[in-house]
Amino acid sequence: MTSPAFLKPARAVTPMAFVRAIAKGYERYGLDPAEALKSAQITPRELARPGARVTAAQFEALSEHAMQELDDEALGWFSRRLPWGSYGMLCRASLTSPDLGVAIKRWCRHHRLLTEDIGLALEVAGGVATLRITENHPLDEAFREFCLVTSLRFMHGYMCWAIDSRISLRSATFPFAAPPHRDAYAPMFTPEVRFDAAQASLSFDERYLALPLQRDERALRTMLKRALPLTILQYRRDRLLGQRVRELLRSRAAEATTADAMAGLLNVSSRTLHRQLHEEGTSLQTLKNEVRHELAVEQLRRTSRPIKQVALAVGFRNEKSFSRAFLQWTGHAPRDFRAQGL
């Protein structure tokens, strides 16, 4: 199976530190990485440059060559090999799950059959799902960063592929100091990355766990032929984006006053925000109107606040524009709506 990818294609942004970790895997098995490096068009001089980067295509070529030549999809991280096809087996074992939550739990359980060096676990609390890695045995420092990053990155890529949806991460943590290439972590995960944490982890909205799997055996076979693009190319559609926008409009309306501000709260560009909402068949303005409508109805039914105050509270500049909008939404003026107990 091909390796997980790290960043968008075409640009040389994958840290050379990850390439050196693969070369260390060759050293562990007493083999020469020259052919693998040659297949990826990486010269010994480039390998030695501390701040060098490689493209995703180069990294894919290197990883696939190394995994097959070493017959170890873990590339030397663990106390025993993970023979070629191990991660494909994990994918297949989770594929029949009724929803993503069950699929992740199966993945974590079956991962123990491959290695006990690390353990994966899913926790859910306060509406947030967190996938954690426990290091049961000390990992060699030459492999530790690459192992933890790759394990989480591939898991995230598989999750997105399985439900055919972009899964927006709320945060990512790593139990080591920020590396010199820390700038690579935001594109790989999320801008909300914390180093020197207790464990490696990913956190995301727990509602993704209830989404059904969208893939079958045929799709899996196609994916396993070349899994790398799953984690290079971010999924364009987030099935929960509209819901998340609604929540922010309700809970943080004062901060989400513009498309740019909303996009910032969601850690996406405003262009991406508009495009994804369009793909869901809605728009930011439509969602704003719907949330304003809902809030206005709540205010009119549950409070005796003056109409002017209700208008300001739900985001209108004056009572006149609010009354006009409310009439369009409900067919009633706000005062009539309240008076008639509608």
Image (cartoon, grey):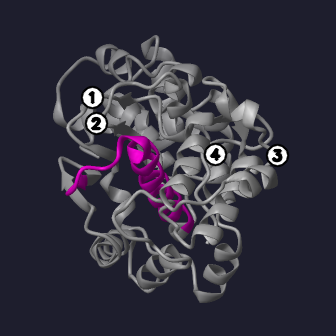
- CA gap between label 2 and label 3 equals 32 Å
Residue sitting nearer the eye, 160 or 40: 40
Q: Amino acid at mark 1?
A: Asp
Instruction: Name the N-terminal-most of marks 1 and 3.
Output: 3
Residue 154 located within the stretch drawn in magenta: yes
Task: For marks 4 and 2, give the one nearer the viewer.
Answer: 2
- CA gap between label 1 and label 4 equals 34 Å
Q: Position of residue 213 (x, y in %)?
A: 48, 75
Number of marks: 4
Q: Are marks 2 and 1 in contact (CB under 8 Å)?
A: yes
Residue 336 located within the stretch drawn in magenta: no
| Disc 2 target residue | 175
At mark 3, the secondary structure is loop
At mark 2, the secondary structure is loop
Instruction: Name the N-terminal-most of marks 2 and 1.
Output: 2
| Disc 3 target residue | 41
Q: Amino acid at mark 2?
A: Pro
Instruction: Name the N-terminal-most of marks 3 and 4.
Output: 3
